Amino acid sequence: MKIKLILVALNLLFTFASCSDRRTVIGVSQCSNDTWRQKVNREIKIGQYKYKNVDVSFCSADNNAKRQVQQIDSLVESNVDLLIVAPSDASTVAPAVERAYKKGIPVILFDRKIDSDSYTTYVGADNVEIGRVMARFIADKLHGKGKVLEIAGLEGSTPVEERHKGFVEVMKRYPNIVTTTVNGDWNVDGARKIMSRCLANDPNINCVFGHNDAEALGAWEAAKAVGKEHDIMFVGIDGLPGERQGIDLVKKGCFAASYIYPTHGEMLVPLAMRILEKQSVPRMNYLHSSLVTVENADIVEMQNNEIASQASSLDAIYANIDNYMKMYRSQKIISWLAYLVVLLLIILAAYNYYVYKTKAKVGRRLRQIADEKVAFFTKASHQLRTPLTLVAGPLQHLISQGHFDEKQQQILDIIQRNVAELEHLTANVLNFQTRVEAVADNTDQIQQSTISDETVSKLVLQDSRRNIVTKNNSDEELDTILIVDDNADIRSYLRSLLSAYYYVIDASDGRNGLRLARESVPDLIVSDVMMPIMNGLEFCSKIKADDVTCHIPVILLTARSNESQRIEGYEHGADAYITKPFNIDLLMTRIESMLANRRKIKLAQSDNSQETVETVDISSADNMFISRFREVAMQHLGDVNLKMDDLCNELRLSRVQVYRKIKALTGNSPSNIIREMRLNRGHYLLCHTDRPISEITYEVGFAVPSYFTTCFKKQYGITPTELRRE
């Protein structure tokens, strides 16, 4: 007990510790790891610092859509709470995002979109507007005429499609500007090769529009290689700080302009937490920015350097905070363990004291109860000896005279055995220890007899089936009564009284009685309440809860006679409650009354009429069973090869159970009911259709028209042909 208490307390401690340190995990899937993406990741970390229980996991696909699909699936399998995805390809990555979204994981699309609506929200720049801004800038610088080379990013990316859309939309207004579009790969080397080829084909290019600064830089390097870097205007998108980045290249005069493509990664974690806290967020979140030109490049660079310096300081501060938090959590766990140890010591001390006091109190009470039991049973045994003597003496004298028939002799033997048992019990009760040993021996005997009862039950069922067949061959089938009592003499006594009027089967306990009731489906059950293995109340409840046996009336016989015990019996489904010692005439009358009531139900069901006596009732469960039987039979009404076993299989009952159940409820056999259903259907079709009689015969399940005619006339007093003539 002490060990269990300690284990429970430790389990509660670690559960509490794990719950208190529950961390939210956000997965970030970037399409690449270029300078712009690295800046976004640094800003996401800054946003993470606002929350103490948030972890962010980063991965990059290096512009490989298939690799990004695998990375997203891996993040989902690791049970992230939310995904931030910058898809490298709108169509290839879409299925992976959809799978995550359908599993209930919120998805934030950042910078790029997918060919699906399966995401929570989008955060990014308005790439169409960026394309328009760049087109207006170029047109203004070229004074409305010239040749422009547009080096787009990887094909399939939504920023590429949207920037090109906005760019072309504005350029259509300038008929003197000729544009050429080629797809690059977002990298310097790829753009350098493209620019070299284009200059070889047409050296008169006036402007290059790169979809990012890396592509614009690659084009500038290719132009420089042939001495045309000053003859061509270069513009790009990103506007990042740093050596050979957009702002630096504008300052040096390599670029005419670079559009600052907004990152704002610091807003992604707060947005994710709002989503996880079930707060409302806009579906589309567009970020706004501006152009970097020679006029404002110094100011923009200064601002970026200041922000970078502050971000670096924040990184150092939060790194120290993380170390402090780890130390705090460790110390917190140690403190809780110390508190727990002290608490366990207090609990164990209190528990030991409680056990000591309880044992002392229980010991005194047990000794008192033992003394009271011995005194009570000793006194009772003395008081029972006188009436037992007065019973045993005359009984022995009566038996010695003889001249009794077999049934009378059987009853006298039962009386003699029970008188001897009472004498034995009253003698043993004088010595309490001897009585305990006797009870233990009796318990072993009961356990041994229980095993044999199961075997006997099977033999009884086999005999009952043979006898039922014999009864069926006679003019009238006797009602079957099941007696359930653990006392063999009671079973024998009741059998001797009832067998002259009914077919009687019996079982020694509730479990065997339940099995026998399901297999034989008797017309009435008489059961004791106090029995081993399964008592009469539980047995009655199971009888009433079983579809096969719920219609069977149950009479409980018991020595429990107060009102609350009677109510308990009725609550468990008993139809009648008779206390011991019972009057045999009362029992016989009650049995006959219940069986007569059941026969009225059968008659009402077989006549299919509403004329029922007020006392006739049928439970909703029985009605449902009959309706289910008719429903299953109706589904196979036209099957001329229909077998009763097929219907029984659909009802999930044996042939005997279906027959006994239907017979008990309606007074008709299942086959008669099916035949009546077929004839009723045939009668309806004859009256309401012009179809040939032979066709109707086969439709309602009769294989031979002549047999249909014979049954029809027997049912309705007229042949099908005569019915049609009327």
Image (tube, helix red, strand yellow):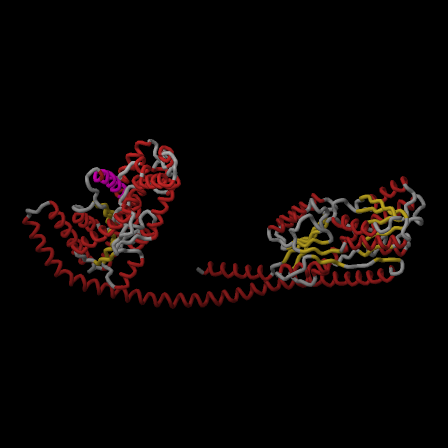
Position in image of residue 140 (x %, y %): 89, 55
- State whether residue 430 is above or below residue 506: below
Q: Nearer the viewer, residue 429 or 33?
A: 33
Position in image of residue 569 (x %, y %): 28, 58
Looking at the image, which residue is at 23% across and 38% down?
Answer: 469
Position in image of residue 186 (x %, y %): 80, 47
Looking at the image, which residue is at 93% across and 46% down?
Answer: 228
Q: Is residue 462 magenta?
A: yes
Left or right: residue 531 versus residue 42 is: left
Q: Is residue 475 magenta?
A: no
Left or right: residue 543 versus residue 168 is: left
Query: Which contiguous range is marked in magenta?
Result: 457-471
Q: Quadrant of the C terminus?
A: top left
Q: Nearer the viewer, residue 343 or 394?
A: 394
Please indicate, yes or no, whether residue 648 appears anywhere in the rendered image. no
- State whether residue 511 is above or below residue 52: above
